[in-house]
Image: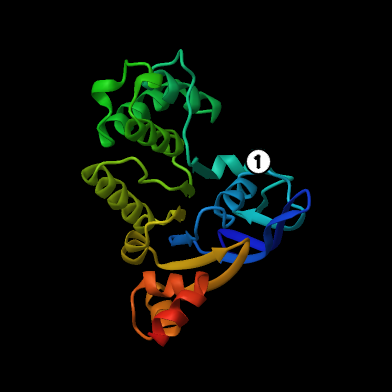
Amino acid sequence: MSEIECADLTKDYGSFRALERLNLQVEAGEIFGFLGPNGAGKTTTIRLLMGMLIPSGGSCRIHGLDCHSDRVRVKHFVGYLPDNPMFHDYLRGEEILHFVGNMHGLDKITVRRRTHELLEQFSLADAAYEYAVNYSAGMKRKLGLCCALIHDPAVFLLDEPTNGLDPIAAREVQNWISASAGAGKTVFLNTHLLEMADKLCHRVAIINNGQLLAVGTPADLENKLCQGGSLEEAFFAVTKPEERLDAQDR
């Protein structure tokens, strides 16, 4: 059984089809990159997997559970980082992690231990008692990662996890993603950073206008779509084929 499964997953917003019959399987221990331009359907897919949206058709499952009908149970197995983490103005960084840990049903000792470990891991210990509203964009993203990690889930859904991070912090996050997969965790990664996806992901999918265009290892897509070129070239070959033809004509 795959850890993440989408079967003909479809989402309409009125007359606009944001996602068209998506079929995907992601295995345990896999880093799966979900690539596409802005508005391609990446965030819609993650929100469907989180049970935040109701599918217009098809279904999606995590850990064998339906992401809509079993959405509360699904959250026990999932750590979610949204594209724009937001926090209560009146809570400090440490208090936010305590709150999230309590929501996941962790005991007080575990909540305190995990909070301390994560604040240290993501270099937020010095800001633990500051109000999160005053955090920089990069600090908020790292705090969001701490929230996703606190209950030690089996699956991570990460929407642009390195946005707003400086190069050192971005590298730390990438190292954590690799280590998590090595420990058997599953990582579903929305990103527009093709170089990072090429280095980090076991497989990638390319989506545009709500339609899945290609799935495979970065090397397979590079060989199939652009005859041994880069993942960036493979990406543009399927999302902007007219530009590729123009370049070949020149």
What is the quadrant of the C terminus in the image?
bottom left
- Furthest-top residue in view? 90
Measured along the vertical axis of the image, is residue 88 above or below residue 40?
above
Colour treatment of the image: rainbow
Dot 1 alpha-carbon crowd within 10 angstroms: few under 14, some 14 to 19, many 20 or more = few
Left or right of 122 in this view: 61: right
Measured along the vertical axis of the image, is residue 243 above or below residue 209?
below
Q: Secondary structure at mark 1?
A: loop
**What residue appears at the point 35 percent right and 46 percent down from the top-left corner?**
162
Left or right of 221 in this view: 138: left
- Among the 4 quarters of the image, the one containing residue 136: top left
Q: x, y percentage for residue 116?
A: 31, 26
Give the residue type at disc 1. Answer: Met
- Furthest-left residue in view? 168
Label 1 sits on residue? 52
> Number of numbered discs present?
1
Q: x, y percentage for residue 216?
A: 47, 74
- Among the 4 quarters of the image, the one containing residue 165: top left
Left or right of 169 in this view: 154: right
**What residue appears at the point 42 percent right and 39 percent down from the top-left corner?**
149
Left or right of 11 in this view: 98: left
Q: x, y percentage for residue 105?
A: 54, 28
Q: x, y percentage for residue 144?
A: 42, 34
**What residue appears at the point 25 percent right and 49 percent down from the top-left corner?**
171
What is the quadrant of the N terminus in the image?
bottom right
User: 23 and 3: which one is in front?
Assistant: 23
Measured along the vertical axis of the image, is residue 208 above or below residue 103?
below
**What residue appears at the point 51 percent right and 24 percent down from the top-left corner?**
102
